[in-house]
Image: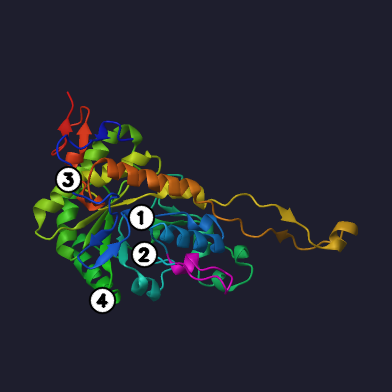
């Protein structure tokens, strides 16, 4: 997507003293550290079974990817299956599926003022998503039979009544989750007006939701990330962390370019979704009577397929290799000087004629 930008190779001269492999650890707000800048921000957990969702979340955690989700939508049906470790608690205004434990266990509480859009482009929760969030269906054997329909997300009364009430909401979340960082997610528009309010609210992180950004406006996409970082740097002494949620279709190298443009964290949902999807399982009949006499019997599903992380692990290694090409000792040292532009004018980025 960011074809106008390329990773710049280190200049000639004495090599800097650095680690052989760049460190991927990211320290946020001086208190909370994440093993890498990669985040699974808005995965469609409801499209797979709870068992697979929980196992996949744990697998992502093992790869150093911070996972956003609610225990209510990921907790497996089977009592022997452990609950997954979740780093980010998505706090939606409607609070579907939210439990107090989600706030207290999370490292980051993400106040999602920007709505997630479905496949139709509208902020709608489909029936499967509503069913997964509902506490009653979690406790019934045949939860899929529960009568649910889709829900328009904007029909719910706003949790933050006005922009001037944001600081009160942030204070409430900090009291409920005193050990966590409070993040506020917004869209890419109206940044000049929105960012000062977020900084005055006491939040420690901004999530810039750009997952629906059109691919043919890639240059404006890069400018918007860079300008957001510049606004944050100019407006206050203490650095506010910046998380960017890009379109799922971006190239692997683009994730590193987003970090160099000024992001501290970047969502890698596009790399995760294919590994998360459940392969088609055959239905077998394990009853002799059903085979020989035609007696109806409940179908028996084959065991839960293993999660194949080979491609995802390969992509993560590619990301690390791209970071290493810049010559930095830590991923947090990435800056715009590590980029070169082919026609796109950005402050701090050298332009090739």
Please name which of the two marks, 1 or 3, marks the residue nearer to the observer: 3
Q: First in sequence: mark 1 or mark 3?
A: 3
Q: CA distance from mark 1 to mark 3?
A: 30 Å
* Residue 16, numbered label: 3
Please name which of the two marks, 4 or 1, marks the residue nearer to the observer: 1
Q: Is residue 157 above or below residue 222?
A: below
Q: Residue 147, image x and y in percent?
A: 58, 63
Q: First in sequence: mark 2 or mark 3?
A: 3
Q: First in sequence: mark 3 or mark 4?
A: 3
Query: Is 325 in front, or is 162?
Result: 325
Query: Is 342 in front, or is 223?
Result: 342
Q: CA distance from mark 4 to mark 1?
A: 25 Å
Residue position marked by numbered label 4 in the rendering: 175
Residue 234 lies left or right of residue 15; in this view the side is left
Q: First in sequence: mark 4 or mark 1?
A: 1
Residue position marked by numbered label 2 in the rendering: 87
Label pair 2/1, CB-CB below 8 angstroms: yes
Which secondary structure lies at badge 2? loop
User: Which residue is farthest right?
Assistant: 293
Q: CA distance from mark 2 to mark 3?
A: 34 Å
Residue position marked by numbered label 1 in the rendering: 39
Q: CA distance from mark 2 to mark 1?
A: 9 Å
Decide whether the magenta segment is chiefly helix, strand or loop: loop
Label pair 3/4, CB-CB below 8 angstroms: no
């Amino acid at each position: 997507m960011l074809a106008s930008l390329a990773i710049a190779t280190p200049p000639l001269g004495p090599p800097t003293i650095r680690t052989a492999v760049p460190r991927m650890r990211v320290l946020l707000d001086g208190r909370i550290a994440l093993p890498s800048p990669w985040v699974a921000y808005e995965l469609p957990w409801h499209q797979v079974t709870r068992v697979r969702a929980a196992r996949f979340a744990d697998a992502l955690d093992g790869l150093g990817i911070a996972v956003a989700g609610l225990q209510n939508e990921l907790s497996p049906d089977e009592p022997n299956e452990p609950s997954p470790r979740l780093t980010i608690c998505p706090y939606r205004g409607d609070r579907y599926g939210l439990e107090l434990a989600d706030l207290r266990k999370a490292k980051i509480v993400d106040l999602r003022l920007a709505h997630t859009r479905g496949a139709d482009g509208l902020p709608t929760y489909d029936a499967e998503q509503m069913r997964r969030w509902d506490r009653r269906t979690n406790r019934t054997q045949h939860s899929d039979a529960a009568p649910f329909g889709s829900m328009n997300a904007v029909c719910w009364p706003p949790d933050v009544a006005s922009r001037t009430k944001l600081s009160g909401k942030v204070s409430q979340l900090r009291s409920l989750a005193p050990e966590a960082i409070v993040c506020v997610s917004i869209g890419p528009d109206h940044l000049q007006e929105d960012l000062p309010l977020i900084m005055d609210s006491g939040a420690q992180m901004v999530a810039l939701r750009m997952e629906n950004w059109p691919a043919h406006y890639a240059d404006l996409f890069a400018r918007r990330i860079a300008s957001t970082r510049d606004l944050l740097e100019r407006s206050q002494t203490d650095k506010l962390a910046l998380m960017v949620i890009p379109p799922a279709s971006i190239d692997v190298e683009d994730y590193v370019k987003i970090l160099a443009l000024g992001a501290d964290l970047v969502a890698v949902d596009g790399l995760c979704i294919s590994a998360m999807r459940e392969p088609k399982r055959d239905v077998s009949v394990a009853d002799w009577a059903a085979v020989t006499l035609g007696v109806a019997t409940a179908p028996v599903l084959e065991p839960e397929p293993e999660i194949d992380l080979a491609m995802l692990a390969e992509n993560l290694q590619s990301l690390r290799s791209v970071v290493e090409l810049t010559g930095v000792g830590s991923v947090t040292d990435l800056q715009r000087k590590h980029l070169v532009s082919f026609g796109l004018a950005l402050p701090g980025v050298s332009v090739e004629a």
